[in-house]
Amino acid sequence: MNMHRVTAALLLGAIGASTLAHCQISVPQPNALPGASRLRASGVAVPEDYTIRIDSFQTLLWQPDDNYFRSPGPVRIELRSFQRGDRLLLTADDAEGRPDGDIVVRGGFRLVREDSVLTGRELTMNVATETGSLVGARAEIGNMRLTGGKLTFTNEGGLVASQASFTTCAHERPDYRIAAREIRLTENGTVTARGVSLFVGKTPVLAVPWMQRNFKRRVQSAFPLPGYSKETGIKLRVGSNIVSRPEAAMTYEIVASLHQSPFGNVTYERDLGRVSKETLPPNTRKVAMSDPLPSALEMHPTLESGYRDLWDEDHRLVAYAALGAKEAVGNRIRTDLRLSRYPEIGLSGFRSGVRRPSNSGAQQASRSVSGPAVADRWGYHWDLSAGWYRELPTDAQAGRLALRTGVASPSWTVLPRLELRAGLAMTGALYDRDRSYGVISPEAEARWNAARSVQLGIAYRQQRERGTTPFVVDRVDVRNEMRLYCQGGQPGWDFSLALAYDTDRMRAYDTNVVLRRKLDCMEVGVSYRSRSQGLGLILNLLP
């Protein structure tokens, strides 16, 4: 087929600025068959480098003098930015390109970018800034699903949906969904929602005015749930993210109860290492603030525990600040201790020695996990902190500079189903008035994989102290501790039972029981601790 060639300049301007691309266009003879036509445009854009390719169309109206095109029939357009490495493929019923750089779609369309798919109708998008809006929208970004009456692209690469619904379930009938007046979803998986209702199946169960959470990791306590302990009576825990970015996170948590005044904390963490869009926000403070004498092996657990969200973390260096009032602090003897931080600042480092179970597929890697994780490398943690503290009910007050360190070994297989691990934790603190205190804690653990879905374990830890401390929370509580545990389950269910035993006093001081119903996208269940006579509800949303 004979072709004639036309060279033109196509203006693809962002709002308030212009972008010039020199395009070479091949135009078929007028008698060419519709649907067999092709147009290719390539060039260098300023300030961004684009290649634009109209892959197929039925009819094309092209006006090079005023930089306008229109394809009133089905059309496919590819936009590629070499500077950012992005590629967008737009398939539309009717597309129009305007001199200001906007592409306007009338009717239905499908927009594909890396692992995300966006469908809807009535799209307006600026090719230089990749901002725009549409109606009747549905976005699929990895496991995340976002729908809305109207959806807007932000210049930070996020999405804002009104009259929206969000879930991480791919099912036609999701296990849960979050309905809200407005939902903002960022590139790193952070969801900010206003006027929020949680639906389990088709039933609304909980509502909050505002919520912010990162859905690339397991979401715990996204909605206020009641609990009970002998110290507080019935209590309600409320918490959320204020900032959630790959390099930084700011959170708050408040607990209101019948028997005590409200208590809680505000924390800020900033990653000092290199981060990317795929990096999860730092999340090291929650467990560190609640356990002043952490076990080295419990910081790197192979079974289900509160530390599970630290699995797979690799060489994180985090600066942090925390302000807390009357927070409950873990102690193996007393349950009435509270600690206030006015404030606390520090640095922490962490490398997980544990990876997620190898039998998890790529899509299920961070979802509900059955079976033990894999401890195949050395893990470490350290924490250097300084602050002013007040302890209740002892009313002890002091400034403190503390260093906590720990290391956990990989698992060593000694028999086909028997594995051994070892760990060492050390804590040192300097207080005002020339006081100092130190603790060293060696420990060992054996785990027997009794069956495919049942694991039994025993661990022993010895704590040795030196010096004096004004705080009960810093003092060694159980010098010789033995832990027995069992975890197992069936498809859709799991349980765990942990018994902590004080070998010096020859008695058990705590029992922890957890029963969970495990769905594809969420976990629900109940937990009980004998030491605090605490009863809690579990509602975890999975990425």
Image (tube, helix red, strand yellow):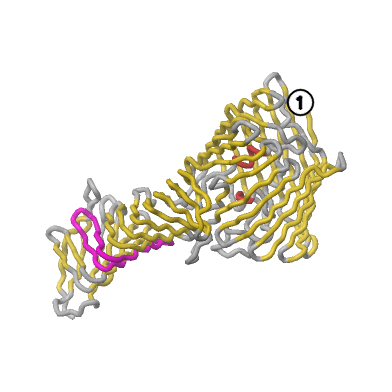
Badge 1 is on which residue?
A: 468
Residue at 68% across, 46% down? 535
Residue 45, by quadrant, is bottom left
Q: What range is drawn magenta here?
A: 91-117
Foreground pick, 194 / 132: 194
Q: In the drawing, does residue 192 fall left or right of residue 508? A: left
Q: How many marks?
A: 1
Q: Residue furthest left?
A: 65
What is the crowding at mark 1: few (fewer than 14 residues within 10 Å), some, or many (at least 20)? Answer: some
Residue at 75% across, 32% down? 475
Q: Residue furthest top?
A: 433
Q: Quadrant of the N terminus?
A: bottom left
Residue 258 sits above or below residue 83 on the image: above
**Magenta region's main secondary structure?**
strand
Foreground pick, 330 / 223: 223
Foreground pick, 324 / 230: 230
Kindly identify the amino acid type of the residue bearing the numbered disc 1: Thr
Q: In the drawing, does residue 186 fall left or right of residue 336? A: left
Q: Is residue 93 magenta?
A: yes
Residue 542, by quadrant, is bottom right
Q: In the drawing, does residue 377 fall left or right of residue 27? A: right
- Give the image location of residue 66, x and y in percent: 13, 58
- Give the image location of residue 53, x and y in percent: 27, 66
- Give the image location of residue 236, x and y in percent: 59, 41
Residue at 57% across, 34% down? 265
